[in-house]
Image (cartoon, helix red, strand yellow):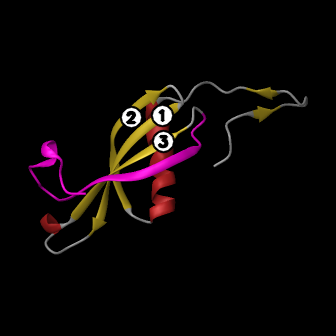
Amino acid sequence: MAGRTTRKDSDEPESLPPLSAAEVARIAIEHLSELTTKEPQGATSVEPTEDGWTVEIEVIEDRRIPSSADMLALYEVELDPDGNLLAYRRTKRYGRGSTDLGRGGAT
């Protein structure tokens, strides 16, 4: 995904308005699904930082039968202010319906 500046007839870049939290979440999900080929379930948090944005995304890591046995994961995605990917990492891995997430779920 390229930067978010556009050019008119001059060589001066025209700045676009800042990204909204919803736009940042959508962009982060696109980046993560492209890189991991995992199925994102949605953003669980979006937070502005000094250097851009941090987005936490829940992903299905491993589908199982029954679906209540699926393995899920949380990924942290870092974006710059324009929505360009800086980094991502898996922070937790857990079974669907796990109740111990608040106590440092499995990684």
Residue 35 drawn at (x, y percent)? 50, 61
Specify whether 80 is left or right of 74. Answer: right
Residue 90 in magenta? yes
Location of the C terminus (image quadrant):
bottom left
| Three-letter code for the amino acid on which mark 2 is drawn | Val
Residue farthest to the left? Answer: 99
| Contact (Cβ within 8 Å) of mark 1 with mark 3 | yes
Mark 1 nearby-residue class (10 Å; few <14, some 14–19, many ≥20): many
The residue tagged with tag 2: helix, strand or loop?
Answer: strand
Q: Going from the N terminus, do you reach mark 3 or mark 2 first?
A: 2
Marks 1/2: CA distance? 7 Å
Kindly identify the residue that appears in the image at 41 percent across and 52 percent down: 89
Asked whether the residues under the numbered discs 3 and 2 touch, taking CB atoms below 8 Å apart as contact, a structural biologist would say: no
Please tell me whether mark 3 sits on a helix, a strand or a loop. Answer: strand
Instruction: Name the residue located 43 percent from the left edge and 37 percent from the top edge.
Output: 54
Badge 1 or badge 3: first in the primary sequence: 1
Q: Which residue is mark 2?
A: 46
Q: Which residue is mark 1?
A: 53
Label drawn at residue 78: 3
Instruction: For the residues labelled 1 and 2, say whether their Cβ atoms are less than 8 Å apart.
Output: yes
Please count the marks in the image.
3
- Is 89 above or below relative to 61? above
Type of amino acid at the residue the image marks with label 3: Glu
* SS class, disc 1: strand
Residue 67: percent from left, percent from top: 17, 67
Q: Which mark is residue 86?
A: none
Q: Nearer the viewer, mark 3 or mark 2?
A: 3
* Separation of marks 1 and 3 at Cα, in angstroms: 6 Å
Instruction: Specify the segment rendered in magenta.
Output: 82-107
Under mark 1, the amino acid is Trp
In x, y percent, where is residue 3? Answer: 68, 40
